[in-house]
Amino acid sequence: MPRHRDDGVATVWAAIVITALAALLAAVVGFGAAVAARHRAAAAADLAALAGAAQAWSGPEVACATATDVASRTGSEVRACELTGLEITIRVARPFAGFGWAEATARAGPVDAVAASRH
């Protein structure tokens, strides 16, 4: 029986398709992990900003130290902390699966009406 030149072509195509599907799966998983890391960083920034705002009356050193402590307990690190009046702005970063850092910024402070009524 003569051999055809297309013997084994299905194996080659199967290998190509499996490789493409594996690459697509890796991309989807990586994207999902990046989104999850960003959400965790945002939650850490929110929590740290709220904690720092609660200490705003004590001054920037105490407020930022409190925010830094809370951020570190969530596995994040504070990249920037600024207290302007009673409003604190925090930028945190969180390691992302060996690919770098996921960053987020949050702001917290009293509502303007509440702050105005205190004076």
Image: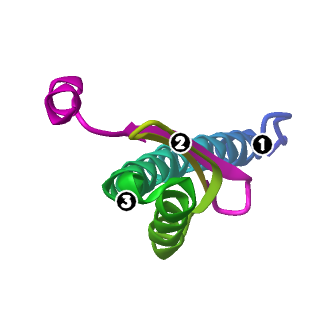
Q: Mark 1: which amino acid?
A: Asp
According to the image, label 1 marks what residue?
A: 7
Residue 8 shown left or right of residue 66 in the figure? right
On the image, the x and y values in percent for residue 7 come to 77, 43
Q: Quadrant of residue 4?
A: top right
Q: For marks 2 and 1, give the one nearer the viewer.
A: 2
- As measured in the structure, the alpha-carbon distance from the residue carrying label 2 to the one carrying label 1 is 55 Å
Which stretch is magenta?
A: 94-119
According to the image, label 2 marks what residue?
A: 104
In this rendering, the count of numbered labels is: 3
Residue 10 shown left or right of residue 68 in the figure? right
Q: Mark 3: which amino acid?
A: Gln
- As measured in the structure, the alpha-carbon distance from the residue carrying label 1 to the one carrying label 3 is 74 Å
Identify the element where label 3 is drawn: loop
On the image, the x and y values in percent for residue 65 come to 54, 66
Q: For marks 3 and 2, give the one nearer the viewer.
A: 3
Q: Earlier in the sequence, mark 2 or mark 1?
A: 1
* Marker disc for residue 55: 3
Residue in view at x 32 percent, y 39 percent? 109
**Considering depth in this image, is 58 or 96 the residue closer to the camera?**
58
Q: Earlier in the sequence, mark 3 or mark 2?
A: 3
Q: Mark 2: which amino acid?
A: Ala
**Considering depth in this image, is 4 or 64 the residue closer to the camera?**
64
